[in-house]
Amino acid sequence: MKHIVEILNADITKITVDAIVNAANNSLTGGGGVDGAIHHAAGPQLREYCITLKGCATGKAKITPGFNLPAKFVIHAVGPVWNNGTGDEEKLLALCYQNSLQLAVENNIKTIAFPCISTGAYRFPFDKAAAIALTTIDAFLKNNPSIEKVYLVVFGEKDHKNYERILNRFYP
Ligand code: ADP
């Protein structure tokens, strides 16, 4: 699966793929970080659409159009807030990736870009989150050949180097 998964140091709102994933909150009505950037770039129609979805549980995902984004769809996944691993955070983070990819398959999405969910305001340790992302994506791709490309998008050189190191350990 090594050739399908690629790390990019970029602003996820600028990437032309079938779908970008948003690290959303339970309300789905917008927030800070990557969520704020996606809503800003997509335009106010995204928020109007999201309001009709009536929120999303942690670990689950919902799909919307991309509106003014280059991406056709946004998959809004709600990551867990890190609480020292006491609240099933690892399992919930894995479910975010799994449920997002499941929605992608159901919507004929072949190229998808993920931010590193929960590693910003939600304080999930980056290395742990990246390893969960890679493990979950790899397992999913083995059973779902319709997905052609998965970009793992990081924001900044430190996270980029970290993610590359974890990827190289994962796919030696
Ligand atoms: P969460 O609340 O799930 O932690 P954040 O948006 O605070 O979500 O952070 C998630 C990750 O997204 C962090 O690693 C952060 O560096 C990254 N990030 C923030 N803005 C962007 C962006 N425009 N494109 C890609 N990644 C981003």
Image (cartoon, rainbow, N blue to C red):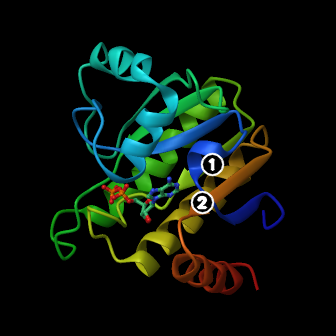
Quick check: is the Cβ at mark 2 less than 8 Å away from ligand 1? yes
Circle 2 sits on which residue?
153
Crowding at mark 1 (Cα within 10 Å: few <14, some 14-19, many 20+) = many
The percent position of residue 11, horizontal first and vertical second, equals 58, 54
- Report the residue at 68% width, 55% height from top: 151
Residue farthest toward the right in the current orientation of the protein: 3
Name the kind of residue labelled 2 in the image.
Val
Of residues 59 and 13, the one nearer the viewer is 13
Quadrant for ligand 1 reads: bottom left
The percent position of residue 92, horizontal first and vertical second, equals 32, 55
- Report the residue at 66% width, 87% height from top: 169
- Report the residue at 71% width, 43% height from top: 144
Name the kind of residue labelled 1 in the image.
Ala
Secondary structure under the numbered disc 1 in the rendered image:
strand
Using the rendered view, name the quadrant where residue 20 is placed: top right
Relative to 22, residue 52 above or below = above
Position of 58 compared to 112: left or right?
A: left
Position of 131 compared to 51: left or right?
A: right
**Which mark is first along the chain, 1 or 2?**
1
- Report the residue at 58% width, 79% height from top: 157
Quadrant occupied by the N terminus: bottom right
| Residue 158, numbered label | none
Crowding at mark 2 (Cα within 10 Å: few <14, some 14-19, many 20+) = many
Of residues 106 and 48, the one nearer the viewer is 48
Q: Is residue 23 visible?
A: no
What whole-number distance in Å separates the C-alpha atoms at marks 2 and 1? Answer: 7 Å
Position of 167 compared to 77: left or right?
A: right
Residue contact at pointers 2 and 1, CB within 8 angstroms: yes
The percent position of residue 95, horizontal first and vertical second, equals 41, 50
Circle 1 sits on which residue?
113
The percent position of residue 82, horizontal first and vertical second, equals 23, 67
